[in-house]
Image (spheres, helix red, strand yellow):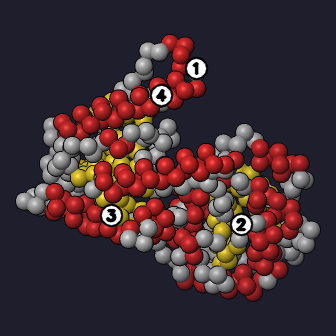
Protein backbone atom coordinates (compact mmCIF):
# COMPACT_ATOMS: atom_id res chain seq x y z
CA UNK A 1 0.00 0.00 0.00
CA UNK A 2 1.20 3.51 -0.79
CA UNK A 3 0.36 5.96 1.99
CA UNK A 4 0.86 9.73 2.21
CA UNK A 5 0.76 11.34 5.65
CA UNK A 6 0.25 15.10 5.49
CA UNK A 7 0.32 17.55 8.38
CA UNK A 8 1.28 21.19 8.03
CA UNK A 9 2.78 22.81 11.11
CA UNK A 10 5.96 24.76 11.73
CA UNK A 11 6.67 22.27 14.54
CA UNK A 12 5.99 18.93 12.84
CA UNK A 13 4.01 16.44 14.86
CA UNK A 14 6.42 13.66 15.95
CA UNK A 15 3.44 11.29 16.22
CA UNK A 16 3.22 11.11 12.44
CA UNK A 17 6.88 10.18 12.34
CA UNK A 18 6.16 7.25 14.66
CA UNK A 19 3.17 6.20 12.58
CA UNK A 20 5.13 6.42 9.33
CA UNK A 21 7.92 4.26 10.74
CA UNK A 22 5.46 1.62 12.02
CA UNK A 23 3.62 1.48 8.67
CA UNK A 24 6.91 1.07 6.80
CA UNK A 25 7.80 -1.82 9.08
CA UNK A 26 4.56 -3.46 7.95
CA UNK A 27 5.80 -3.34 4.35
CA UNK A 28 4.08 -0.20 3.10
CA UNK A 29 5.56 2.70 1.20
CA UNK A 30 4.99 5.83 3.26
CA UNK A 31 5.78 9.42 2.35
CA UNK A 32 5.60 11.89 5.21
CA UNK A 33 5.00 15.60 4.56
CA UNK A 34 6.63 18.08 6.93
CA UNK A 35 7.18 21.83 6.54
CA UNK A 36 10.71 23.16 6.42
CA UNK A 37 11.67 26.46 8.12
CA UNK A 38 10.65 28.39 5.00
CA UNK A 39 7.12 26.93 5.13
CA UNK A 40 7.64 24.72 2.08
CA UNK A 41 6.37 21.14 2.08
CA UNK A 42 9.00 18.40 2.03
CA UNK A 43 8.09 14.76 1.48
CA UNK A 44 10.31 12.11 3.09
CA UNK A 45 10.30 8.40 2.31
CA UNK A 46 12.21 7.49 5.48
CA UNK A 47 15.59 7.88 3.82
CA UNK A 48 15.56 11.06 1.79
CA UNK A 49 13.49 13.99 0.54
CA UNK A 50 11.52 12.85 -2.51
CA UNK A 51 9.46 15.94 -3.26
CA UNK A 52 9.12 19.63 -2.40
CA UNK A 53 6.27 22.09 -2.91
CA UNK A 54 7.09 25.78 -2.50
CA UNK A 55 4.85 28.01 -0.38
CA UNK A 56 3.73 30.81 -2.76
CA UNK A 57 4.44 34.41 -1.76
CA UNK A 58 1.93 36.78 -3.38
CA UNK A 59 3.78 39.93 -4.51
CA UNK A 60 1.54 42.41 -2.72
CA UNK A 61 4.29 44.65 -1.39
CA UNK A 62 3.51 46.71 1.69
CA UNK A 63 -0.20 45.87 1.49
CA UNK A 64 0.48 42.69 3.42
CA UNK A 65 0.73 44.81 6.59
CA UNK A 66 -2.98 45.59 6.47
CA UNK A 67 -4.86 43.06 8.67
CA UNK A 68 -7.54 42.09 6.14
CA UNK A 69 -5.09 41.95 3.24
CA UNK A 70 -2.68 39.88 5.34
CA UNK A 71 -5.40 37.33 6.12
CA UNK A 72 -6.45 37.09 2.48
CA UNK A 73 -2.84 36.80 1.33
CA UNK A 74 -2.15 34.00 3.82
CA UNK A 75 -5.23 32.06 2.77
CA UNK A 76 -4.42 32.50 -0.90
CA UNK A 77 -0.89 31.23 -0.30
CA UNK A 78 -2.24 28.15 1.47
CA UNK A 79 -4.72 27.45 -1.33
CA UNK A 80 -1.97 27.67 -3.94
CA UNK A 81 0.23 25.40 -1.81
CA UNK A 82 -2.59 22.85 -1.52
CA UNK A 83 -3.02 23.00 -5.29
CA UNK A 84 0.65 22.15 -5.73
CA UNK A 85 0.32 19.28 -3.24
CA UNK A 86 -2.64 17.99 -5.28
CA UNK A 87 -0.51 17.97 -8.43
CA UNK A 88 2.21 16.07 -6.58
CA UNK A 89 -0.29 13.49 -5.30
CA UNK A 90 -1.81 13.08 -8.77
CA UNK A 91 1.63 12.25 -10.11
CA UNK A 92 2.54 9.87 -7.30
CA UNK A 93 -0.94 8.26 -7.04
CA UNK A 94 -0.90 6.94 -3.46
CA UNK A 95 -3.63 4.60 -2.31
CA UNK A 96 -4.38 6.61 0.82
CA UNK A 97 -3.76 10.21 1.86
CA UNK A 98 -4.17 10.91 5.57
CA UNK A 99 -4.50 14.60 6.45
CA UNK A 100 -4.29 16.27 9.83
CA UNK A 101 -5.62 19.80 9.23
CA UNK A 102 -3.56 21.43 12.01
CA UNK A 103 -3.27 25.14 11.18
CA UNK A 104 -3.40 24.99 7.39
CA UNK A 105 -6.22 26.60 5.44
CA UNK A 106 -7.80 24.86 2.48
CA UNK A 107 -7.60 21.16 3.35
CA UNK A 108 -11.11 20.83 1.90
CA UNK A 109 -9.54 21.26 -1.54
CA UNK A 110 -7.21 18.26 -1.30
CA UNK A 111 -9.72 15.43 -2.00
CA UNK A 112 -11.78 17.33 -4.57
CA UNK A 113 -11.96 15.23 -7.78
CA UNK A 114 -8.99 13.08 -6.74
CA UNK A 115 -10.55 9.63 -7.15
CA UNK A 116 -9.56 6.81 -6.82
CA UNK A 117 -7.29 8.00 -4.01
CA UNK A 118 -8.85 7.46 -0.56
CA UNK A 119 -8.68 10.51 1.71
CA UNK A 120 -8.74 10.28 5.51
CA UNK A 121 -9.29 13.37 7.67
CA UNK A 122 -7.38 12.89 10.91
CA UNK A 123 -8.94 14.94 13.72
CA UNK A 124 -6.25 14.70 16.39
CA UNK A 125 -7.83 17.88 17.69
CA UNK A 126 -11.28 18.98 16.62
CA UNK A 127 -10.51 22.71 16.85
CA UNK A 128 -13.25 23.18 19.46
CA UNK A 129 -13.08 26.60 21.08
CA UNK A 130 -15.20 28.61 23.50
CA UNK A 131 -15.14 32.17 22.23
CA UNK A 132 -16.90 34.95 24.09
CA UNK A 133 -19.43 37.37 22.71
CA UNK A 134 -21.96 37.00 19.93
CA UNK A 135 -19.43 37.37 17.12
CA UNK A 136 -17.12 34.79 18.66
CA UNK A 137 -19.94 32.29 19.10
CA UNK A 138 -21.09 32.84 15.51
CA UNK A 139 -17.56 32.24 14.25
CA UNK A 140 -17.28 29.06 16.33
CA UNK A 141 -20.65 27.82 15.09
CA UNK A 142 -19.72 28.41 11.47
CA UNK A 143 -16.33 26.73 11.97
CA UNK A 144 -18.02 23.64 13.41
CA UNK A 145 -20.45 23.44 10.48
CA UNK A 146 -17.49 23.72 8.10
CA UNK A 147 -15.62 20.94 9.92
CA UNK A 148 -18.70 18.74 9.76
CA UNK A 149 -19.07 19.43 6.02
CA UNK A 150 -15.46 18.45 5.33
CA UNK A 151 -15.81 15.34 7.46
CA UNK A 152 -19.06 14.03 6.01
CA UNK A 153 -18.87 15.23 2.38
CA UNK A 154 -15.32 15.96 1.23
CA UNK A 155 -13.33 13.16 2.87
CA UNK A 156 -13.92 9.43 2.66
CA UNK A 157 -13.41 8.81 6.38
CA UNK A 158 -12.56 10.71 9.54
CA UNK A 159 -10.38 9.44 12.36
CA UNK A 160 -10.53 10.46 16.02
CA UNK A 161 -8.40 9.60 19.04
CA UNK A 162 -11.40 9.02 21.32
CA UNK A 163 -15.18 8.58 20.94
CA UNK A 164 -15.70 11.80 22.92
CA UNK A 165 -14.17 13.84 20.10
CA UNK A 166 -16.13 12.00 17.42
CA UNK A 167 -19.41 12.51 19.26
CA UNK A 168 -18.69 16.18 19.93
CA UNK A 169 -18.16 16.89 16.23
CA UNK A 170 -20.58 14.47 14.55
CA UNK A 171 -23.18 13.63 17.18
CA UNK A 172 -24.40 10.25 18.41
CA UNK A 173 -24.34 8.79 14.88
CA UNK A 174 -20.61 9.53 14.46
CA UNK A 175 -19.67 5.96 13.45
CA UNK A 176 -21.27 6.51 10.02
CA UNK A 177 -18.37 8.79 9.09
CA UNK A 178 -15.71 8.24 11.72
CA UNK A 179 -13.37 5.68 13.22
CA UNK A 180 -11.47 5.79 16.50
CA UNK A 181 -7.80 4.88 16.40
CA UNK A 182 -5.97 5.67 19.65
CA UNK A 183 -2.63 7.29 20.22
CA UNK A 184 0.29 4.94 20.51
CA UNK A 185 3.12 4.92 23.00
CA UNK A 186 6.74 4.13 22.38
CA UNK A 187 7.35 0.47 23.24
CA UNK A 188 10.22 1.57 25.50
CA UNK A 189 7.71 2.90 28.03
CA UNK A 190 6.24 -0.57 28.39
CA UNK A 191 9.57 -2.40 28.33
CA UNK A 192 11.43 -0.25 30.86
CA UNK A 193 12.13 -2.10 34.08
CA UNK A 194 10.61 -0.14 36.97
CA UNK A 195 11.88 -0.80 40.48
CA UNK A 196 10.10 0.33 43.63
CA UNK A 197 11.51 3.42 45.26
CA UNK A 198 12.67 2.93 48.85
CA UNK A 199 10.42 5.02 51.08
CA UNK A 200 13.32 6.51 53.01
CA UNK A 201 15.40 7.13 49.89
CA UNK A 202 17.40 10.34 50.27
CA UNK A 203 17.35 12.87 47.49
CA UNK A 204 18.09 16.54 46.96
CA UNK A 205 14.68 17.52 48.35
CA UNK A 206 14.51 15.21 51.38
CA UNK A 207 15.15 16.01 55.02
CA UNK A 208 16.56 13.28 57.29
CA UNK A 209 13.75 10.90 58.24
CA UNK A 210 11.17 12.67 56.07
CA UNK A 211 9.49 11.07 53.07
CA UNK A 212 9.15 13.69 50.35
CA UNK A 213 6.56 12.85 47.68
CA UNK A 214 7.82 13.81 44.26
CA UNK A 215 5.42 14.90 41.51
CA UNK A 216 6.35 15.41 37.87
CA UNK A 217 4.69 17.18 34.96
CA UNK A 218 6.13 16.50 31.50
CA UNK A 219 5.14 18.76 28.62
CA UNK A 220 5.63 22.09 26.93
CA UNK A 221 5.67 24.98 29.38
CA UNK A 222 3.38 27.30 27.44
CA UNK A 223 0.91 29.92 28.63
CA UNK A 224 -1.96 28.19 26.81
CA UNK A 225 -1.52 25.19 29.12
CA UNK A 226 -2.21 27.39 32.18
CA UNK A 227 0.34 25.65 34.36
CA UNK A 228 -0.06 28.39 36.94
CA UNK A 229 -2.89 26.21 38.29
CA UNK A 230 -0.31 23.63 39.38
CA UNK A 231 1.95 26.33 40.79
CA UNK A 232 -0.88 27.93 42.77
CA UNK A 233 -1.92 24.48 44.00
CA UNK A 234 1.63 23.92 45.29
CA UNK A 235 1.52 27.33 46.95
CA UNK A 236 -1.75 26.45 48.70
CA UNK A 237 -0.45 23.01 49.65
CA UNK A 238 2.62 24.53 51.27
CA UNK A 239 0.43 25.92 54.06
CA UNK A 240 -0.33 22.32 55.09
CA UNK A 241 2.94 20.52 54.36
CA UNK A 242 6.30 20.97 52.70
CA UNK A 243 6.92 17.24 52.31
CA UNK A 244 6.56 17.36 48.53
CA UNK A 245 8.36 18.52 45.43
CA UNK A 246 7.08 19.27 41.94
CA UNK A 247 9.20 19.06 38.79
CA UNK A 248 8.00 20.77 35.60
CA UNK A 249 9.95 19.21 32.75
CA UNK A 250 9.73 20.49 29.19
CA UNK A 251 10.62 23.21 26.69
CA UNK A 252 9.80 26.73 27.85
CA UNK A 253 7.74 28.66 25.31
CA UNK A 254 6.34 31.07 27.94
CA UNK A 255 9.35 33.37 27.99
CA UNK A 256 10.28 32.54 31.57
CA UNK A 257 6.79 33.37 32.90
CA UNK A 258 6.56 30.25 35.08
CA UNK A 259 10.12 30.65 36.36
CA UNK A 260 9.24 34.18 37.50
CA UNK A 261 5.96 33.05 39.08
CA UNK A 262 7.80 30.42 41.14
CA UNK A 263 10.29 33.07 42.28
CA UNK A 264 7.55 35.59 43.12
CA UNK A 265 5.74 33.04 45.28
CA UNK A 266 8.94 31.88 46.97
CA UNK A 267 8.38 28.29 45.84
CA UNK A 268 11.97 27.48 44.86
CA UNK A 269 12.13 24.82 47.54
CA UNK A 270 8.99 23.09 46.29
CA UNK A 271 9.12 23.49 42.51
CA UNK A 272 11.93 22.89 40.03
CA UNK A 273 11.58 23.82 36.35
CA UNK A 274 13.85 21.85 34.07
CA UNK A 275 14.46 22.08 30.32
CA UNK A 276 13.31 19.33 27.98
CA UNK A 277 15.26 16.10 27.77
CA UNK A 278 15.90 14.00 24.70
CA UNK A 279 12.86 11.81 24.16
CA UNK A 280 14.77 8.61 24.86
CA UNK A 281 15.61 9.94 28.35
CA UNK A 282 12.09 10.97 29.37
CA UNK A 283 10.86 7.57 30.56
CA UNK A 284 13.88 6.97 32.79
CA UNK A 285 13.57 10.43 34.31
CA UNK A 286 9.82 10.13 34.87
CA UNK A 287 10.03 6.93 36.91
CA UNK A 288 12.31 8.63 39.42
CA UNK A 289 9.16 10.32 40.75
CA UNK A 290 6.20 9.12 42.80
CA UNK A 291 3.21 10.66 41.02
CA UNK A 292 2.78 11.93 37.45
CA UNK A 293 0.65 15.01 36.81
CA UNK A 294 -1.65 14.78 33.79
CA UNK A 295 -3.05 18.28 34.08
CA UNK A 296 -5.16 19.63 31.21
CA UNK A 297 -6.71 23.14 31.23
CA UNK A 298 -10.37 23.84 30.47
CA UNK A 299 -9.42 25.90 27.42
CA UNK A 300 -9.00 25.21 24.56
CA UNK A 301 -11.94 22.80 24.82
CA UNK A 302 -10.21 20.60 22.23
CA UNK A 303 -8.18 18.94 24.92
CA UNK A 304 -11.22 17.58 26.74
CA UNK A 305 -12.09 15.27 23.84
CA UNK A 306 -8.90 13.31 23.31
CA UNK A 307 -6.24 11.86 25.60
CA UNK A 308 -2.80 13.41 25.85
CA UNK A 309 0.18 11.30 24.93
CA UNK A 310 1.74 11.88 28.33
CA UNK A 311 -1.09 10.32 30.34
CA UNK A 312 -0.82 7.21 28.17
CA UNK A 313 2.94 7.11 28.72
CA UNK A 314 2.47 7.46 32.48
CA UNK A 315 0.09 4.49 32.44
CA UNK A 316 2.56 2.46 30.37
CA UNK A 317 5.31 3.22 32.92
CA UNK A 318 3.13 2.07 35.81
CA UNK A 319 3.27 5.38 37.68
CA UNK A 320 0.44 6.66 39.90
CA UNK A 321 -1.32 9.52 38.11
CA UNK A 322 -3.11 12.66 39.22
CA UNK A 323 -5.20 13.66 36.21
CA UNK A 324 -7.75 16.30 35.30
CA UNK A 325 -11.21 14.75 35.41
CA UNK A 326 -12.57 14.47 31.87
CA UNK A 327 -13.71 11.54 29.73
CA UNK A 328 -10.48 10.37 28.03
CA UNK A 329 -8.53 10.51 31.31
CA UNK A 330 -11.17 8.35 33.01
CA UNK A 331 -10.20 5.56 30.61
CA UNK A 332 -6.63 5.71 31.91
CA UNK A 333 -6.95 6.63 35.59
CA UNK A 334 -9.20 4.68 37.95
CA UNK A 335 -9.80 7.00 40.88
CA UNK A 336 -8.51 5.49 44.09
CA UNK A 337 -6.91 2.57 42.25
CA UNK A 338 -3.96 3.78 40.16
CA UNK A 339 -4.31 7.46 40.94
CA UNK A 340 -6.77 10.29 41.42
CA UNK A 341 -8.96 12.49 39.24
CA UNK A 342 -9.29 16.16 40.13
CA UNK A 343 -11.44 19.04 39.00
CA UNK A 344 -9.62 21.80 37.19
CA UNK A 345 -9.38 24.07 40.21
CA UNK A 346 -6.53 25.02 42.51
CA UNK A 347 -8.40 23.62 45.54
CA UNK A 348 -9.11 20.25 43.91
CA UNK A 349 -5.55 19.84 42.63
CA UNK A 350 -4.08 20.79 46.00
CA UNK A 351 -6.39 18.40 47.88
CA UNK A 352 -5.52 15.50 45.58
CA UNK A 353 -1.79 16.16 45.95
CA UNK A 354 -2.26 16.34 49.73
CA UNK A 355 -3.89 12.91 49.79
CA UNK A 356 -0.82 11.35 48.18
CA UNK A 357 1.46 13.14 50.65
CA UNK A 358 -0.41 12.65 53.91
CA UNK A 359 -1.44 9.02 53.35
CA UNK A 360 1.62 6.94 52.57
CA UNK A 361 -0.46 3.75 52.59
CA UNK A 362 -2.68 5.21 49.85
CA UNK A 363 0.36 6.17 47.77
CA UNK A 364 1.80 2.66 48.15
CA UNK A 365 -1.60 1.19 47.21
CA UNK A 366 -1.72 3.28 44.01
CA UNK A 367 1.88 2.43 43.22
CA UNK A 368 1.26 -1.32 43.47
CA UNK A 369 -1.85 -1.10 41.32
CA UNK A 370 -0.20 1.13 38.75
CA UNK A 371 2.65 -1.35 38.36
CA UNK A 372 0.13 -4.16 37.86
CA UNK A 373 -1.88 -2.08 35.38
CA UNK A 374 0.91 -1.20 32.97
CA UNK A 375 -0.66 -1.20 29.54
CA UNK A 376 -0.40 0.72 26.31
CA UNK A 377 -1.12 0.56 22.61
CA UNK A 378 2.19 0.60 20.73
CA UNK A 379 2.73 2.32 17.40
CA UNK A 380 2.93 -1.10 15.78
CA UNK A 381 -0.59 -1.78 17.11
CA UNK A 382 -1.79 1.62 15.87
CA UNK A 383 -0.37 1.04 12.39
CA UNK A 384 -2.17 -2.30 12.22
CA UNK A 385 -5.45 -0.66 13.27
CA UNK A 386 -5.17 2.03 10.61
CA UNK A 387 -4.36 -0.59 7.99
CA UNK A 388 -7.07 -3.08 8.90
CA UNK A 389 -9.94 -0.87 10.12
CA UNK A 390 -9.52 2.32 8.07
CA UNK A 391 -7.36 1.96 4.96
CA UNK A 392 -8.31 -1.53 3.81
CA UNK A 393 -12.11 -1.02 4.04
CA UNK A 394 -11.83 2.28 2.17
CA UNK A 395 -9.79 0.76 -0.63
CA UNK A 396 -12.15 -2.18 -0.85
CA UNK A 397 -14.87 0.35 -1.68
CA UNK A 398 -12.86 2.62 -3.95
CA UNK A 399 -10.71 -0.01 -5.66
CA UNK A 400 -12.61 -3.28 -5.34
CA UNK A 401 -10.34 -5.14 -7.77
CA UNK A 402 -7.11 -4.21 -5.93
CA UNK A 403 -6.00 -6.18 -2.84
CA UNK A 404 -6.37 -3.47 -0.18
CA UNK A 405 -3.56 -4.53 2.15
CA UNK A 406 -0.98 -5.63 -0.38
CA UNK A 407 2.16 -3.43 -0.36
CA UNK A 408 2.93 -1.90 -3.76
CA UNK A 409 6.31 -1.38 -5.28
CA UNK A 410 7.59 2.18 -5.08
CA UNK A 411 7.75 4.17 -8.29
CA UNK A 412 11.18 5.21 -9.40
Q: For the point 79% across and 65% down, which residue is it?
A: 346
Q: For the point 57% across and 64% down, which residue is it?
A: 304
Q: Is residue 85 above or below residue 271?
A: above
Reading the image, the residue beneath label 1 is 65
Circle number at residue 48: none
What is the spatial separation of the Cα atoms under label 4 and label 2, in whole angstroms?
38 Å
What is the spatial separation of the Cα atoms under label 3 and label 1, in whole angstroms?
41 Å
Query: Can you give x and y, in whole percent of width and height, for residue 204 in the image?
Result: 80, 61
What is the spatial separation of the Cα atoms under label 4 and label 3, in whole angstroms?
31 Å
Q: Residues within 10 Å of mark 4 (few under 14, many from 20)?
A: few
- The answer to whether marks 4 and 2 mark residues whose Cβ atoms lie closer than 8 Å is no
- The answer to whether marks 1 and 4 mark residues whose Cβ atoms lie closer than 8 Å is no
- The answer to whether marks 4 and 3 mark residues whose Cβ atoms lie closer than 8 Å is no
Tell me where residue 368 sits by quadrant: bottom right
Q: Is residue 385 left or right of residue 334?
A: left
Query: Can you give x and y, in whole percent of width and height, for residue 111 in the image?
Result: 27, 45
Reading the image, the residue beneath label 4 is 72
- The answer to whether marks 2 and 3 mark residues whose Cβ atoms lie closer than 8 Å is no
Tell me if residue 249 can be seen. yes
Q: At numbered mark 1, what does the secondary structure look like: helix, strand or loop?
A: helix
Which of the two residues, 287 or 407, is positioned nearer the viewer here? 407
Sequence-earlier tag: 2 or 3: 3
Q: Is residue 291 left or right of residue 394?
A: right
Query: Can you give x and y, in whole percent of width and height, for residue 344 in the image?
Result: 71, 66
What is the spatial separation of the Cα atoms under label 2 and label 3, in whole angstroms?
32 Å
Q: Is residue 345 above or below residue 412?
A: below
Amino acid sequence: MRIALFRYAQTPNPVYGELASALRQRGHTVWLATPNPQGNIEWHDGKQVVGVQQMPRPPWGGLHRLPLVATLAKRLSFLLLIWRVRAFLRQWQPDVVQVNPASIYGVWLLPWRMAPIAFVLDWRQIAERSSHGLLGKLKDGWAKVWRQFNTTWMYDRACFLHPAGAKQLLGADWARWGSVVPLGVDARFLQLAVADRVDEQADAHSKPGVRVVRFIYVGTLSRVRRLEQLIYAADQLRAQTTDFHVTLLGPDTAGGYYHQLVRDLGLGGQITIRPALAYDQVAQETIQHDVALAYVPNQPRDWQFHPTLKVLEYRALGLPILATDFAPNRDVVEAGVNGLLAANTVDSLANAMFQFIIDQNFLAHCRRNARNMRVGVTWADVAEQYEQTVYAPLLALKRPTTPATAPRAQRV
